[in-house]
């Protein structure tokens, strides 16, 4: 009788195991669609046990050349993404908000993109495309909360931080910008809530829409004279910034959106209060 019970229990466990494997396999979804240049990945979804995903090189013998909008975005458990040699276009939303991502790898034969220390760049290294949130020193404690934040130095070849390159990268704490940086794109650092104060280089020309919105730990900001454009909501919600110090003596030669500053809500009224701007301040006076 005991042998029969043991056999029955083993059979149940085997069935449960097979069902579990089948369930996990069913959770993996890759949807590819036709484009002018071949196939494009439209959507990937995987189970919580899946830490690495490789984009197919071909589908039905036809090259996969694009990662479409949101194709791998919000993949909560992925730690690695591998991109093949045929990918020629990556939408700026394609890899957004993958909180556990440690590295993006690119086939060395890809003529359009490359990976350096797990960060995604254009092949010429002039544009930083996607930064993986859980890289460059990020660690977690036993509860899953951050134990340490990442520190990153942008290579000096980089002239452009692409739209959404660091979008919702709550793991980054410190950044040093390229000495040749010219543009910071739309929502490039939106909701980098643990990013602390940094220096903008004297080569910077444009700060895009929502570039640093809701960066809650920024407390000071010095804008060099090279900056010509600051777009809508560039620092919206970055309410810990006490003052903007501008190297230019006035707004001449600048395109400043009427909504670029943070907006603070007064406790005593429903009126909004803007962070003050001080003009004609040298970098050595930046405090």
Image (cartoon, helix red, strand yellow):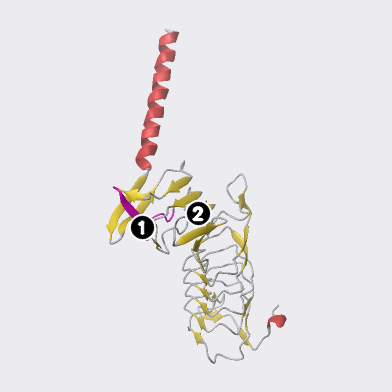
The picture places residue 195, in percent across and down from the top left corner, at 60, 64
Q: Nearer the viewer, residue 188 or 240?
A: 188
**Magenta residues, start to end:** 60-74
Q: In the image, is 254 to the left or to the right of 56?
A: right
Quadrant where the image shows the C terminus: bottom right
The picture places residue 98, in percent across and down from the top left corner, at 48, 54
- Residue 254 sits above or below residue 48 on the image: below
Residue drawn at (41%, 45%), measured in percent from left and top?
Answer: 46
**Closer to us: mark 1 or mark 2?**
1
Residue drawn at (71%, 82%), measured in percent from left and top?
Answer: 285
Q: Residues within 10 Å of mark 2 (few under 14, many from 20)?
A: many
The picture places residue 32, in percent across and down from the top left corner, at 31, 52
Residue 116's tag is none
Q: Nearer the viewer, residue 110 or 130?
A: 110
Type of secondary structure dominating the magenta stretch = loop
Q: How many marks?
A: 2
Sequence order check: which comes first, mark 1 or mark 2? Answer: 1
For residue 174, what is the image quadrant? bottom right
**The magenta stretch spans residue 69:** yes
Q: In the image, is 38 to the left or to the right of 91?
A: left
Residue 104's tag is 2
Q: Secondary structure at mark 1?
A: strand
Residue drawn at (39%, 61%), measured in percent from left and top?
Answer: 88
**The magenta stretch spans residue 55:** no
The residue that mark 1 highlights is 65
Residue drawn at (47%, 58%), measured in percent from left and top?
Answer: 97
- Residue 225 sits above or below residue 166 on the image: below
Quadrant where the image shows the N terminus: top left
């Amino acid at each position: 009788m005991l042998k029969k019970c043991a056999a029955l229990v083993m059979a149940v466990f085997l069935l449960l195991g097979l069902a579990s494997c089948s369930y996990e396999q069913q959770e993996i979804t890759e949807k590819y669609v036709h484009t002018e240049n071949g196939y494009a990945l439209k959507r990937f979804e995987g189970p919580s046990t899946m830490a690495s995903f490789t984009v197919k090189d071909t589908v039905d013998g036809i090259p996969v050349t694009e990662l479409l909008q949101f194709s791998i975005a919000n993949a909560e458990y992925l730690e690695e993404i591998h991109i093949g040699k045929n990918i020629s276009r990556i939408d700026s939303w394609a890899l957004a908000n993958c909180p556990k991502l440690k590295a993006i790898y690119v086939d060395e034969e890809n003529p359009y993109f490359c990976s350096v220390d797990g960060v995604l760049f254009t092949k010429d290294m002039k544009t930083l495309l996607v930064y993986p949130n859980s890289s460059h020193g990020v660690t977690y404690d036993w509860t899953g909360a951050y134990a340490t934040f990442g520190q990153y130095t942008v290579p000096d070849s980089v002239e452009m931080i692409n739209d959404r390159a660091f979008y919702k990268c709550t793991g980054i704490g410190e950044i040093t910008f390229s000495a040749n940086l010219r543009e910071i794109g739309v929502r490039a650092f939106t909701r980098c809530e643990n990013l602390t104060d940094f220096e903008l280089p004297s080569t910077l020309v444009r700060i895009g829409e929502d570039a640093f919105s809701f960066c809650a730990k920024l407390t000071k900001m010095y804008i060099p004279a090279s900056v010509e454009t600051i777009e809508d909501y560039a620092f919206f919600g970055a309410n810990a910034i006490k003052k903007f110090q501008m190297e230019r003596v006035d707004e001449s030669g600048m395109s400043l959106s009427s909504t670029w500053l943070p907006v603070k809500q007064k406790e005593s009224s429903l009126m909004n209060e803007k962070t003050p701007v001080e003009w004609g301040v040298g970098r050595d006076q930046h405090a």
